[in-house]
Image: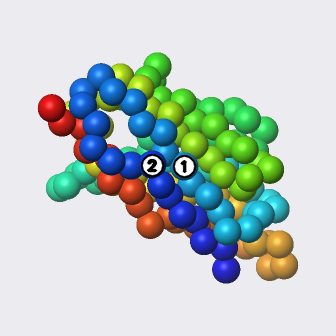
Amino acid sequence: QVQLVESGGGLVQPGGSLRLSCAASKSILYIYSMSWYRQAPGKQRELVASITSSGSTNYADSVQGRFTISRDNARNTMYLQMNSLKPEDTAVYYCNVDFRMPLSGTRTNYWGQGTQVTVSP
């Protein structure tokens, strides 16, 4: 079983930056896409950013131009660089990997445990 471990969250002032990491315990061979989601208290979980195995990226309108998603295949790790942070960015951030199981061929996904990001004076 592959585990996704997130890190890099914390408390930051408005306008500040954070870099989130999501490390897989081992390589996942057949990846369709990797994504970051977030969920604020009382709100639905929303897609923040995604990147395909070929490197194509997509961002929510609310973070466009401020956040950057990337991955390092050699380290089995993906990142979310968050700049110009706003109080409304406060949420628990989760990583997700959409992939195909090698033996059964079933498409499934893994979730990280989440990391708290708080943007406040």
Name the kind of residue labelled 1 in the image: Ser
Name the kind of residue labelled 2 in the image: Gly
Q: Earlier in the sequence, mark 1 or mark 2?
A: 2
Which residue is labeled 2 in the image? 8
Crowding at label 2, few (<14), some or many (≥20) Cα neighbours within 10 Å?
A: some
* Figure coloring: rainbow
The residue at the far top in this view is 65
Residue 113 in which image quadrant: bottom left
- Residue 67 visible from this viewpoint: yes
Is label 1 in a helix, a strand or a loop? strand
Residue 13 in which image quadrant: top left
At 18% from the left and 36% from the top, the residue drawn is 120
Crowding at label 1, few (<14), some or many (≥20) Cα neighbours within 10 Å?
A: many
Q: Whole-percent x and y of residue 10?
A: 33, 48
Circles 1, 2 touching at the beta carbon (< 8 Å): yes
Q: Nearer the viewer, residue 19 or 38?
A: 19
- Residue 37 visible from this viewpoint: no
Q: Is residue 78 above or below residue 28?
A: above
Is 79 left, or right, of 20 in this rendering? right
At 50% from the left and 58% from the top, the residue drawn is 6
Disc 1 from disc 2: Cα separation: 6 Å
Which residue is labeled 1 in the image? 21
Q: Whole-percent x and y of residue 17?
A: 39, 30
Is label 2 in a helix, a strand or a loop? loop
At 39% from the left and 56% from the top, the residue drawn is 115
Q: Is residue 12 above or below residue 98?
A: above
